[in-house]
Image (tube, rainbow, N blue to C red):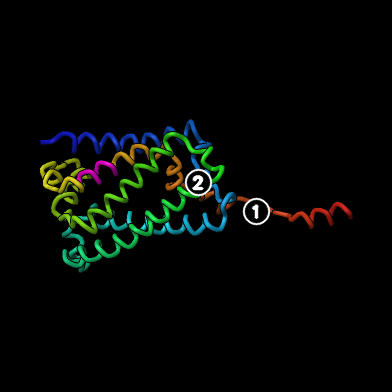
Amino acid sequence: MNYFWVIYPYVAVTIFFGGYIYTYLTRRYYWSARSFELLAKRTHTYASNFFHYGIVIVLLGHLVGIAIPASALLVIGLTYSLHEAVAFYLGALFGVIAIIGLVWLLILSYLTRASASLSITDHLVYIVLILVIATGLYNTLIVHPDYMTTVAPWFQGLITFHPNTSLIEKAPLSLQIHVALSFLLYALWPFSRLVHVFTFPITYLWRPYIVYRGYRYSRVVRKR
């Protein structure tokens, strides 16, 4: 048994959840995307939409394709060949959209004053995130690995605490690198701007309205 594929994922996930708790309790200010939209409003919106819509679809595809057993997918009519076709076309399409949006956002951030607010972890996370998406696209478009019989059952074994490392060891090296980089990203996640992903603003449901008054309105009120 290769213990790397047992210990490493659990350590990364532990850091992920522990990091969220630590950030929430001790670094509440950093629980934000610290957006620089005011510095590049229109272009930032387009780039942000590209990245967010692309990455969300990619993550949902991974959740369905890897975390859910193939037998459960067959129940809803998602056969192996259909699943493979959906993973290829949708994965490639939204993967390309995500990396275009990410590169676009990085260009905007490094060309504006927003770069001054980036931490060392942010820089590292951006590098790892690009590598994760790039290796994912490489596997999808070029390698075409059979992850349904390698990475998927190994990952499901992690969830049930019975991982079979021989399964992921059969996967191509490029796919193993993609998985290893993904878990590295999870470990860095809560200490970077990505921490805002799991923020749910439920207090907005009962928070009082904020009244904004324009400059002209304020001048009229003062004259009265």
Residue annotated with mark 1? 209
Residue at 50% over, 46% down: 109
Q: Regarding mark 1 in the picture, which secondary structure is present there?
A: loop
Q: Position of residue 156 (x, y in %)?
A: 20, 48
Give the dominant element type of the magenta stretch: helix, strand or loop: helix
Left or right: residue 79 compared with residue 41: left
- Disc number at residue 130? none
Instruction: Kindly identify the amino acid type of the residue bearing the numbered disc 1.
Output: Tyr
Residue at 20% over, 44% down: 176
Q: Quadrant of the N terminus?
A: top left
User: Is 61 rendered above or below residue 174?
Assistant: below
Residue at 55% over, 54% down: 205
Q: Position of residue 57 (x, y in %)?
A: 35, 59
Residue annotated with mark 2? 109
Q: Viewer-proximal residue, 169 or 27?
A: 169
Q: Position of residue 144 (x, y in %)?
A: 18, 57
Instruction: Kindly identify the amino acid type of the residue bearing the numbered disc 2.
Output: Ser
Residue reaching furthest to the front: 111
**Magenta-colored span:** 176-182
Question: Which mark is first along the chain, 2 or 1?
Answer: 2
Find out whether residue 196 is within the magenta segment.
no
